[in-house]
Image: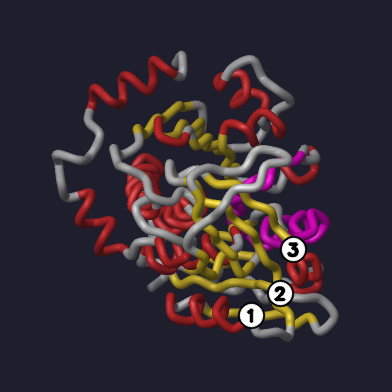
Amino acid sequence: MTSTVLVAGSANLDFVVRAAHVPAPGETVLGREFRTFPGGKGANQAVACARAGGAATQMLLALGSDDFAKPIEASLNAAGVQLHIVREAQLPTGTAFICLSDDAENAITVAPGANMALQPQHLPALDGVQWLLLQLETPVDSVLAYARAARAAGVKVALNAAPAQVLSAELLAQLDMLIVNEGELDVVAGNPPDLANGLARLDVPCVIVTLGARGCLARHEGHTLVQPAFSISPVDTTAAGDTFCGTLVATLARGEPLQQALLAASAASALACMQLGAQSSIPDHTEVAALLADATRVPGADAHAALAAWCAL
């Protein structure tokens, strides 16, 4: 491995209950199976990056001194992620409470806990790091500090702006890549009338918008790229976006062009939707390669044209 990706972000233990549907406000729903899974946007993306292959993966994370931290560490270690752990004695390990419906939709509430203890001074040395991958489940001041340090060190910076919040021009100026879904694009770009205007409003060299079951759209160096989604029957979409982000950055880190990275990330996220859990659902590079080798399942020219038309490009 000649490339290294550092993920700095959140790690949670997910408490997942399955139910017929996600409850409406004030509604009580009788659930069925209950399980716990290692999760958190940062940790999920680190596992996806490591399993994508071709790039060494490190992660900066904060955990409590409790039993909830143990399965998170075990999952990251099993994936081959090198850990830089900030141990927080005063705060519990982050948790997420997830209701997963029979149609694969979910409702998630996060209690950040130790994740909020990540501070600017915790960033490890960036020697040999090519990409820094960030999210917004940790303090935004720390996210900005990490991005600044990476930019100063010549490290490329990717931010998955989730959960959605307004981003400062100062933070945007540090980024090489911004990854958002449609809802996050609305917030970050100030409710644009359409996707094209949203992309144009963001002064970042590369902006990628994930479009759920439709696929994704990218604006890079004056060019627009689309990647239709793979056709699947989803079981659990919990970590689909995180799988996309981690696979995308890992593929770029090993020197692949953006269009190939979008294809690989789309394949990995599709496979992740077909298994339960967050990190437990993330495929490895052999599974992704097998899907990409099946010409009957890879979206073709007609699918690209249809997505481009839908995006009004």
Q: Name the residue under label 2.
A: 93
From the viewer's perspective, tell me whether residue 147 is left or right of residue 17. right
The residue singled out by tag 3 in the image is 112
Relative depth, front residue between 281 and 118: 281
Q: Which of marks 2 and 3 is nearer the N terminus?
A: 2
Q: What residue is shown at x 35% (from left), y 47% (from top)?
A: 270
Q: Position of residue 262 (x, y in %)?
A: 39, 43
Q: Distance between the residues labelled 2 and 1?
A: 6 Å
Looking at the rendered structure, the secondary structure element under dot 1 is: helix
Instruction: State the quadrant of the N terminus.
Output: bottom left
Q: Do callouts 1 and 3 mark residues in contact (Cβ within 8 Å)?
A: no
Q: Which of 22 and 49 is in front in this view?
A: 22
Residue 105 position, x and y percent, is 50, 43
Q: Mark 1 points at which residue?
A: 69
Residue in the picture at 25% in, 64% down: 286
Q: Which of marks 1 and 3 is nearer the N terminus?
A: 1
Amino acid under disc 3: Pro
User: Marks 2/3: CA distance?
Assistant: 8 Å
Amino acid beneath label 2: Thr
**Which quadrant is home to the C terminus?**
top left
Secondary structure found at label 3: loop
Task: Please state the horizontal and vertical placement of residue 119, each as a whole percent of the image.
Answer: 81, 69
- Residue 219 shows up from this direction: yes
- Color theme of the render: secondary structure
